[in-house]
Amino acid sequence: MSINRRRALNIVLVISLGANLLVFGGIAARYFDTPNGRPIPPNLSWVFRELDEATQARLKPMLEEYSDEIRPMRYALFQAQGAVNELLTKDPINKEEIGQAFDALRAAGIQYQDRSHEQTLEIFAQLSPEQRVSAMRYIQERSRSPRESREQNREPQQTH
C-alpha cells in the first residue's frame, strides 16, 4: 500500500470517527436537553430551583449520594443506546442481534427509571407541602406540549 493511499485511508477513518462521535453526542444532547424527546428522567437537581437555601443545604448531601449511585446506571443506559445505534447501521441488519440490544437497552432504562423514581419519592418526602407544590409546578411547565403552551399564552377572547 502506498504512503499516499495509507494517509488518505487514515484521514477518512478519522473523519468517520469524528462524524460518529458528533452524531452520538447530538443524540445524547437531545435526550437531555428536550423535555419531550428525552427517554431519561431529569436529574433531581431540578428540585433545587424552587427551594430556599437552608433546604438546599440540607438536601445537597443526599442529592450528591443519589448522583453517585445513579451515574453508573446512566452510563449503562448510554452504552446500551450506543450498541443499538451501532447495530442499526451495520449491513446487513441482524434482527436477532438488534432485538437483544433493544432488550438490554430496555432493561437498563427500566433500572434507571425505577431508581430515579425511588429517589424522587425519597427527596419529596423531605419537602414541605408548599415545596412539593412548587417543584411540581416546575415539572408541569416543563412537561407541557408546545400546543398547550401556545394555547395557555393566548389571551382569552372577550365576548360582547
Image (cartoon, grey):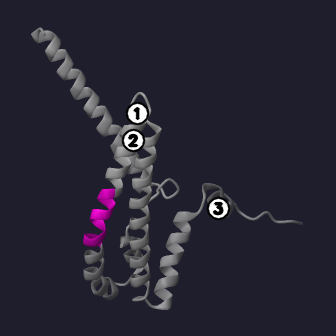
Crowding at dot 1, Cα within 10 Å, few <14 / some 14-19 / many 20+, comes out as: few
Q: Is residue 75 magenta?
A: yes
- Judge left or right: residue 17 versus residue 123: left
How packed mark 2 is, by other alpha carbons closer than 10 Å (few <14, some 14-19, many 20 or more), is some
In the rendered view, tell whether residue 82 sits above or below residue 56.
above
Q: Quadrant of the N terminus?
A: top left
> In the depicted view, which residue is nearer to us: 28 or 94?
94
Residue lying farthest to the right in this orientation: 160
Q: Nearer the viewer, residue 100 or 28?
A: 100
Sequence order check: which comes first, mark 3 or mark 1? 1
Q: Secondary structure at mark 1?
A: helix
Task: Identify the magenta region.
Answer: 67-76
- State the residue at coordinates (41%, 54%): 105
The answer to whether marks 2 and 1 mark residues whose Cβ atoms lie closer than 8 Å is: yes
State the separation of the CA atoms marked 3 and 1: 42 Å
Query: Can you tell which quarter of the image residue 62 is in?
Result: bottom left
Residue 85 — which label? 2
Looking at the picture, tell me which residue is in the foreground, 148 or 8.
8
Task: Please state the horizontal and vertical placement of residue 50, each as a whole percent of the image.
Answer: 42, 78
Find disc 3 in the rendering and name its residue: 153
Residue 159 seen in the current view:
yes
Question: At label 3, which amino acid type do we have?
Answer: Asn
**Residue beneath disc 1:** 89
Q: Residue 77: horizontal and vertical position, in percent?
A: 35, 56
Callout 3 touching callout 2 (CB < 8 Å): no
- Residue at 20% x, 18% y is 9
Compared across the picture, whether 62 is left or right of 9 comes to right
Say which amino acid is labelled 1: Thr
Residue ID at (50%, 53%): 37
Q: Is residue 4 left or right of residue 65?
A: left
